[in-house]
Amino acid sequence: MTANKIKIFIFTILLFECFNCRAESQITIASKTFTESVILGELASQITGAKTVHQKQLGGTRVLWSALLRGDIDIYPEYSGTLLHEIFAGHDKNTDLHALLKPLGIAATRAIGFNNTYALGMRPASATELGINTISDLANHPELQIGFSNEFINRSDGWPGLQTHYRLPQKKVRGLDHDLAYRGLTNESLDVIDLYTTDAEIHYYNIKILHDDLNYFPEYNAIFLYRLELEQSAPQVIRQLKRLENVITADAMTTMNMQAKLERVPEAEVAAKYLSTQLNVNSEIVIDSRWSRLVRHSIEHLVLVGISLGAAILVALPLGIAAYLNTRLGQFILSCTAIIQTIPSLALLVFMIPLLGIGSPPAIAALFLYSLLPIIRNTHTGLHDIAPPVRESAKALGLSRTARLRLVELPLATRSILAGIKTSAVINVGTATLGALIGAGGYGQPILTGIRLDDTSLILEGAIPAALLALLVQYSFDLAERLLISKGLRS
Amino acid sequence: MLTLSNIQKSFDNQVALDIPHLNITGQQTTILIGPSGCGKSTLLKMINGLIKPDQGEVLFKQGKINTQNINLLRRQMGYVIQEGGLFPHLSARDNIMLMPRHIKLAPDTAEQRLQSLAELTQLDAGQLKRFPSQLSGGQRQRVALMRALILDPDLLLLDEPLGALDPMIRFEMQSQLKSIFQKLGKTVLMVTHDLNEAGFFGDHLVLLRSGKIVQQGTARQLIENPNEPFVEQFINAQRAPSIIAR
């Protein structure tokens, strides 16, 4: 029993290790979960050549920053303002970024050209009519309808600071979703909205940006962060990366954002077109067909589900049996797994990152933990609910404890145990879509991209196979039930 | 065959058994009888170790029963309970053959025993293929008896084996069981609350009340010479009321 447990443990560790290892020479570029970042990641990946891979929309600032610190990724696009206001919040705003980064083994390129900061925008017609060109001009028009994204209203460097800085008289400000704000502006229910200076919609809706004449908004200059050691180990890559310094203007970036977001051109193509026209870099890009994407995502998803569920069965069955054999231990095991179950799945995934990095290992570990409870509980319940006369008869025959479990109790609990595994498997298939948030791929990947690009067909490209897989799992377990459960227990 | 001495057992500070001495003679049928809660089933379970005594010891074939030897000793004691306790996931045949296979008894020997027991209990091959849920109550009890006898035990422990059967089948099974016991010549210890059944099967009756032995002897001795008023009450209570008024 103990020897078996050790074997299982070692086996699990080996599996995780195997997924953890990366080819030594490969350089990983990552991007955040919004379109501009994905395009920047593509630009970096294409200009640096074949030695790099791009992990698209890997996560938010915190995920990418800690992955960079750990060395799980090597390069990612960031904004100077984000570094100063989020990562190094509390430091003097005039500190040299390079001085803060160097002790951490991180370096940054110079600004790659554009500044994607907050701005205020209006319909050009109404701006001209009212003679508004700068934010200062707003002070003369307290009657204007203002709608800001909720984050902007609450951030200290957002509306509260802006209002004080410019002494703006407007009292009533509506909070709403950023994407809806554009619609509010065009249908004239709003006059002024906040925006990011490289938003795709600025061109699309032809929005007038008000000049920040009193220099209120901090700079969010786009840069690339990279691990310092690359300067020695891959100088060529860094040299290529630095070709993007001071090249991309806000207009160019906005155009690229628009192509990707509004015209639905794949980011790789957008980046390739820019590089060939502006820098004369010709990169070969492979745009996956829907089928090859589906196959890749299916394999990734099945790996996530298969390994996590398999390991969960191997661990949860013995734990469920142990919980049945020893009441006090059982209470402990059941409460521990119940606590794990209460952790929100996203939080559990993020907890795993410091331990296991990014990609499949933390996702598999989180899914494994989630799969434990239904199996343990159903194993315990199935064994516990066996009729006392049957249990007593097995004892009275002179069967040892293990023989009783093997010949009588486990076969009688099979239905319950299988039901537990089925529950785990179905939940697992659904939860595994969240793995895409930390770079584990799977059906969550197209869902995530689809949400980002507001593309329903992409969302369905992940959601439909995930639902079908869940159904398939359900049916296979129904079949397994028919094969594994004795006929004597069915009538 | 079986000796119990100085047995004490309480549940929640309530005396369940208090038996200074009890001897069960080999090759005859002994009946444990008494009202509900008198401790007769507890006593039976103590003999095959399902319940441990607080004090005292159980000697089986001169050996003391303890946790080390209990599983080996249980294989020499067949045990049948009211509902049979058959394993629902196994066919009747697999229920019976579970132990022979587990202890790796020669398949030929096991098969031979199965055949002769099937003849004895009048179960055919088709019935043996069925699962317990597909058998009648009487058939289930016969399968349970076969399972209890398949390892050719020295002692047969029966806890109200016919208690759940309807009267017609019960009557039929009583005579069948008695003839089986006679043919096998085994030591049988049976629990029942029915005096008629006790008198029908038993060479020797042990009457219990609140965990203590009140009187033992043949049915005739108990009826003719009750040694305290309770014995007389118990016997009178079990006399069938006259169906036709005189």
Image (cartoon, coloured by chain):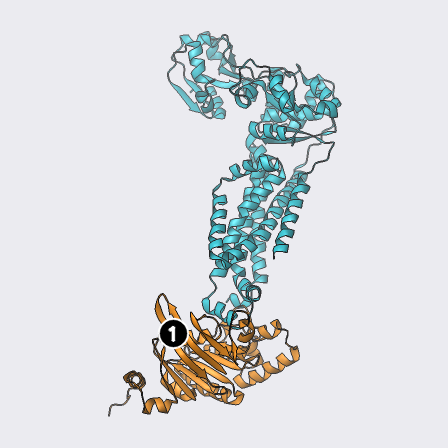
Chain colours: A cyan, B orange
Q: Quadrant of residue A485?
A: bottom right
At horizontal 62% and vertical 48% (from top left) the residue drawn is A306
Reply above or below: A430 against A477.
above
Query: Which of A433 and A332 lies nearest the eye of the viewer?
Result: A332
Q: Is residue A467 left or right of residue B33?
A: right
Q: Which residue is mark 1?
A: B17
Q: Is residue A296 left or right of residue A377?
A: right
Query: Which of B243 and A277 lies nearest the eye of the viewer?
Result: B243
* Disc 1 secondary structure class: strand
Reply above or below: A208 against A21.
above
At horizontal 53% and vertical 23% (from top left) the residue drawn is A86
Q: Could you tell me if residue A282 is visible in this image?
A: no
Reply above or below: A333 against B23.
above
Q: Which chain letter goes with mark 1?
A: B
At horizontal 53% and vertical 75% (from top left) the residue drawn is B74
Q: Residue A344 location in percent, x, y?
A: 49, 39
Query: Which of A129 and B37 lies nearest the eye of the viewer?
Result: B37
Count neighbours of disc 1 (C-alpha within 10 A) and say few if under 14, some if 14 to 19, many if 20 or more. Answer: many
Amino acid identity at mark 1: Leu
Q: Could you tell me if residue A147 is visible in this image?
A: yes
Task: Assign the N terminus of chain A to one quadrant of the image.
Answer: bottom right
